[in-house]
Amino acid sequence: TAPHTHGPRALFVSCASIKMDYTSLDDFPLETLYFRNGTEVDPYDHRCKLGIPGGSQGIHTFQLVWALLCAAQALFLFSKWPKVGWEAMYMPCCEALSYGLLSSGYGYMKLHGEFHYLPWIRYAAWLVTTPVLLNQVQGMIDIKIGSLRLAPIQSLANLIMIIMGVSAHLQENHAWKWLFFFVGCVMCAVIYYIAWLQFAKVNELYAATKTEIGDKVCFQLKLIMFCFYVGWSMFSVIWLLSSEGLCLIEEHISAAAHIPGDILSKNSFGLLMWYTRWITLGGAWDINKFLEKQAKEKAEAVLTPAEKRKAIMKQAEACFSMADACLQQANTCLQQAMQAEDAEPKGAAEQPAQHRPQALAGHPMENEMLASMGKLSYPLRFDVDQAVTSGTGWKEGNGGVENAIRTSMQKLRRKQREM
């Protein structure tokens, strides 16, 4: 058996114990039938020798530099905590690990045959990163057809696509290889279609707001879609051109070409998703929260400083009016309670000393008084409760309940004058 040493193909010839060497493709007798393990074989049915990993030291240096840049991106995003999701930090960490292994030469596994290698780290990286990428897209909005949620279907299609890619790479039979590749492309189309529905729906919702921020979100969504579709499509094209597919480019060139695809599909995509969600939208894709926030900001922006002060003064006046009403009601209730106590027979058994709320127990106005007192602002309610629980009466000098209410009202009026 002698491999052909020139051109994009490696030819293997087996004919009993006879060894034949050919130095050019023209010397090879294509009309002759050759056999491998007793089976007739097409001389072009072979394993592409361009799949041998290697290349210049510059390729490994390029991969190592990119691994360091991915680590730097992860550190940058970590510095933004808590205004960042874990997905944005997870992605560059996985890239730093995978490209670090590739630069050291540990990203390939030799299989059967002289030229058959499996870039296992590449498929492993896809397996642990693509579900997280899709999870970010699915986090924008939940798309349904009837009662059927499309997010699980999208995740399942992604898993099948990766399995089909690995299976196509491992296949010796060309027919099976291209069948697996076709099924993987169909699953990729399913992912693209569901992602398009998700992007289109989010874009529609924010465009309908007709706000400056809504327009900004729509523009950023277009950039996200570009990174998603172009980046993911690059991997399919590279697979087709590399030794795994048509055998048109060498493996080290294929490995280097994956870096631009990762820049778009992972790094740029992750940064844009983080910026849109946490910087532009404040941490959530929820359109209802966005509309509430916009309405609040719009209402505040309409008021001038003088109008804002007037609104605050109006709120203070409402508090004063409520406090006056509560004061009058409490005074009336306590007077009625004291009159009821004076009307009791003198020979009745003495009751233990009770605080004001206990003295009013069972009084017809008790619930109304307590409900009104509960509406008071915190400083007023605190002073009143302190005076009541200390056991003082209604008019017992500076410690009395009436005095506590009036003191708190004076504090509120002083604050109003200072505004």
Image (cartoon, helix red, strand yellow):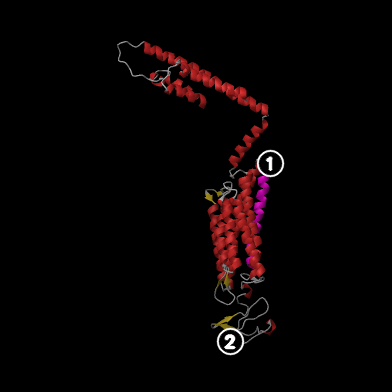
Residue identified by numbered label 1:
212
Q: In the depicted view, which residue is nearer to us: 149 or 407?
A: 407
Residue identified by numbered label 2:
15
- Most common SS among magenta residues: helix
Q: Residue at x 67, y 68 (%)?
A: 58
Seen in the picture, residue 87 relative to 124 is either above or below; the reply is above
Q: In terms of sequence position, does the residue under pointer 2 or pointer 1 come before the other? A: 2
Tell me if residue 246 is in the magenta stretch: no
Residues at marks 2 and 1, CA–CA distance in whole angstroms: 75 Å
User: Which residue is most to the front?
Assistant: 398
Q: Measuring from the top left, give residue 232's x and y in whole percent.
A: 63, 59
Residue 330 in view, yes or no: yes
Seen in the picture, residue 260 relative to 295 is either above or below; the reply is below
User: Which residue is most to the bottom?
Assistant: 18
How crowded is the residue under tag 1: few (<14 C-alpha within 10 Å), some, or many (20+)?
A: few
Looking at the image, residue 400 sits to the left or right of residue 51; the answer is left
Q: Residues in magenta?
A: 212-240
How crowded is the residue under tag 2: few (<14 C-alpha within 10 Å), some, or many (20+)?
A: few
Q: Measuring from the top left, give residue 111's x and y in whole percent.
A: 55, 73
Q: Residue at x 61, y 39 (%)?
A: 291
